[in-house]
Amino acid sequence: MCRIGPALTFERVWVETGCRQVIASLARGRGHRFALERAVFLTVLHRLMRGGSDLAADRWREEYRIAGSEQLDLHHLYRAMAWLGEELPAGAGHKSLQALSTRYAAPWPAKIKNKEYRPRPTDQR
């Protein structure tokens, strides 16, 4: 029996935050012959739930039902992580990543501009 809870929950966050769209748009036209976005999703979910290597993620996913990961092999996970580590060409993806980061950036208190500011327990949310 496969577990579905973590994948369903994180899938919703993944989509609503725009991560799926940003990764898919950055990967478009790269010639990958596998579901790169799904490989990234799987490895990120594994690191959130359990932690460990890509090999551990490949074994771990056998216990979970993760949409779109059925056709992925271990080398796809390695390639996805290598792709994430690549340096982007100048300007490539800048607008997508900037939009994502500004949309979900945590609001800082006005006091944070002071470099000497140290949060008190009552300042923390």
Image (spheres, helix red, strand yellow):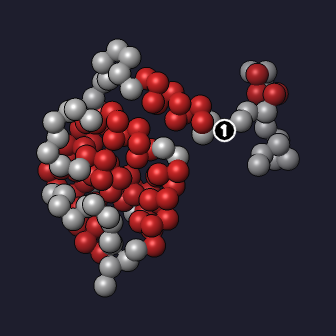
Q: Residue at x 30, y 18 (%)?
A: 89
Check the image and name the residue furthest to the top.
90
Q: What x and y, as percent, mark residue 71?
A: 17, 61
Q: Nearer the viewer, residue 109 or 10?
A: 10
- What percent of the width, then of the height, locates residue 47? 39, 55
State the image coordinates of residue 88 (x, y, percent, origin top left): 32, 23
Q: Which residue is mark 1?
A: 106
Asked if residue 43 can be seen in this view, the reply is no
| Residue 96 placement (x, y as % from top left) | 45, 30
Task: Check the image and report above or below for 27 versus 88.
Answer: below
The mark total stands at 1
From the viewer's perspective, is 109 left or right of 5?
A: right
- The reply, left or right, for residue 11 in relation to residue 34 is right
Q: At label 1, which amino acid type do we have? A: Ala
Residue at x-position 43% and y-position 23%: 94
Look at the picture and state if 59 lies above or below 96: below
